[in-house]
Amino acid sequence: MKEYSNQGSQDTRSGFGAGLTELGRTNPNVVALCADLIGSLKMDQFIEENPERFFQVGIAEANMMGIAAGLTIGGKIPFTGTFANFSTGRVYDQIRQSIAYSNKNVKICASHAGVTLGEDGATHQILEDIGLMKMLPGMVVINPCDFNQTKAATLAIADHEGPVYLRFGRPKVANFTPADQNFEIGKGILLQEGTDLTIVATGHLVWEALEAAKTLHSNGISAEVINIHTIKPLDKDIILKSVGKTGAIVTAEEHNYLGGLGESVARVLAENNPTPQEFIATQDTFGESGTPAQLMDKYGLNAAAIVKASEKVIQRK
Amino acid sequence: MFNKFQTIMRKKIVEILILLYKIKHMSSTHSMQDIVTQVRRDILRMVHKVNSGHPGGSLGCAEFFVSLYNEVLDLKEGFDMNGTNEDLFFLSNGHISPVFYSVLARRGYFAVDELNSFRLIDSRLQGHPTTHEGLPGVRIASGSLGQGLSVAIGAAQAKKLNNDSKLVYALMGDGELQEGQNWEAIMYAAAKKVDNLIATVDLNGKQIDGSTDEVLPMGSLEAKFLAFGWDVLTIEKGNDIEAIVAGLHKAKGMTGQGKPICILMKTEMGNGVDFMMHTHAWHGKAPNDEQLSSALAQNPETLGDY
């Protein structure tokens, strides 16, 4: 088995902040907007270095999305920053008409996604955002797994022409992908080779999937682990190639099973190679207050849950 | 003696210049009126053909669009999305697409024949304007109300970043101001001193369900915009070309002074067609054959029908 080591836990939102800072130095067209959450989004450094390229919009997300769309007319590449809930559900029609349908080059950067936002509770823990965004024609949806990958994704989306939804989180999580990685939008990454089942994970669940694979290995089960950082466009090839070998799959995400990565994978499998699948995701429920670890445990979003689902899916082969 | 002669000559030259200006102004006003009449015909024929669309607000803003595109906007030849070094216009109340399409076509953005395809399948002239089909002259989709002002503000701020001294114009409906996003945008534009922006409100006092006062009274829009920190001017005769041009030029002169500019333009919905005026009934209804004949008879062909 391949060994992955945690280079020191960090939050993915800091990866976004680091990427944005680098873009501020290298791409003069990049501008940033924020709806009163500079510190939470780690945008401070970009603002300090490029005050004229930053727009504080206040607590007015709808206006922020419209302004971002307008800034593209004039060649700017706007990065909007607020929590995932206020980046999607709150402003869905603004994104739909002024950004997606108008095909504007806006990068919607969303922090504090999922239950790992923690104590603030369900009002702020969106578990529907991947579904909302992937349904919009032309929208790219990315959910990177750690600090390094979030930084790399932030750099990569600046070079992609068109609207992008970049989703990341609040808690410190294992940072295990290479610092110098080249982020390719729409390309899954094979992290662990295996023969008995495939685990396809996104975001915070990727590290949990690697931990699960270790446990499964010691139980005599060989799990292949794939990091799907881009939910749309989905890398069908890497998934089909893997299930062609393993014949069973577990999908894992910090999101409702309705509308998430699991459903996208299920559609690809249904069309090409019907395969037993188990879904690690929230089960059509809202979140609640608690520590991130408590919530991931309660809602079945950790390595232990993946192990259980893996053992189950193999029985269904 | 010589000085006196010089003074007289100077006065004469000024008088001649004023006369020339008046002649040019008269003739241009006259020809703009011809364009307005033709635009009205375009609007009526477009909505009649597909038995759908919004003639009322379109007719009410015909003079505004014709004045804006023929006398006010500083435009380059052709169309590019970024609109660098030219004035930009954003239509927020996208349902008045017929007047927008007609004026864009008459201004040369695309062939007037294409007006035939309004609201038909596979058309670039969608029910509400969109960039999706690549229609020249359109820079944002609009139709879901309340979003255009924010977009115009973003475009105005991009111009400032690009050291582009040209202006950004927007048009909103008055009923549309019931959407909350406008007030976020109005607050922001003043706070950020977006003073290269002229936003006009089509004050026709009507919306789908009745008068704006019946549906949701908005009080004094002038007091509201002033309280939010905008400069406000009113065009009392919003269907009079001279009054509109004068108002827009005045607004232009007020830009660059730290405040966004709002024009409250009082218009008559359905203007130019007697039975469509003084009612909200023609907001989103097309005329039948008989009504079309009557409406067209009131507006004889000038530039030639498409």
Image (cartoon, rainbow, N blue to C red):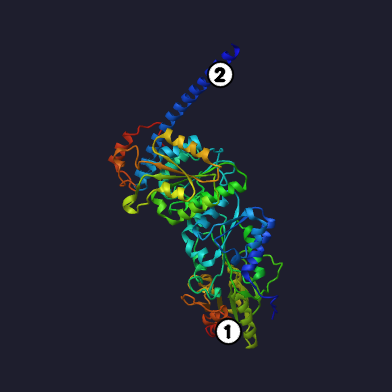
Disc 1 designates what residue? A304
Q: Secondary structure at mark 2?
A: helix
Q: Is residue B211 visible?
A: no
Up-down: is B67 above or below A33? Answer: above
The residue at the far right in this view is: A180
Label 2, label 1: how many angstroms apart (C-alpha)? 94 Å
The residue at the far top in this view is: B1
Q: Amino acid at mark 1?
A: Ala
> Along the line of sight, which residue is nearer the eye, B250 or A309?
B250
Disc 1: which chain?
Answer: A
Residue displayed at 69% across by 67% down: A181
> Alpha-carbon neighbours of circle 1 within 10 Å: few (<14), some, or many (≥20)?
some
Q: Position of residue B86 (x, y in %)?
A: 56, 41
Up-down: is B294 above or below B194? Answer: above
Disc 2: which chain?
Answer: B
Is A190 positioned to the left or the right of B265 in the image? right
Q: Position of residue B56 (x, y in %)?
A: 35, 44
Q: Secondary structure at mark 1?
A: helix
Is A28 positioned to the left or the right of B140 in the image? right
> Alpha-carbon neighbours of circle 2 within 10 Å: few (<14), some, or many (≥20)?
few
The residue at the far bottom in this view is: A219
Q: Quadrant of the N terminus of chain A?
A: bottom right
Is B150 positioned to the left or the right of B238 in the image? right
Q: Position of residue A50 (x, y in %)?
A: 66, 55
Disc 2 designates what residue? B10
Quarter holding residue A220:
bottom right
Residue B151 numbered mark, or none? none
Is B199 positioned to the left or the right of B164 in the image? left
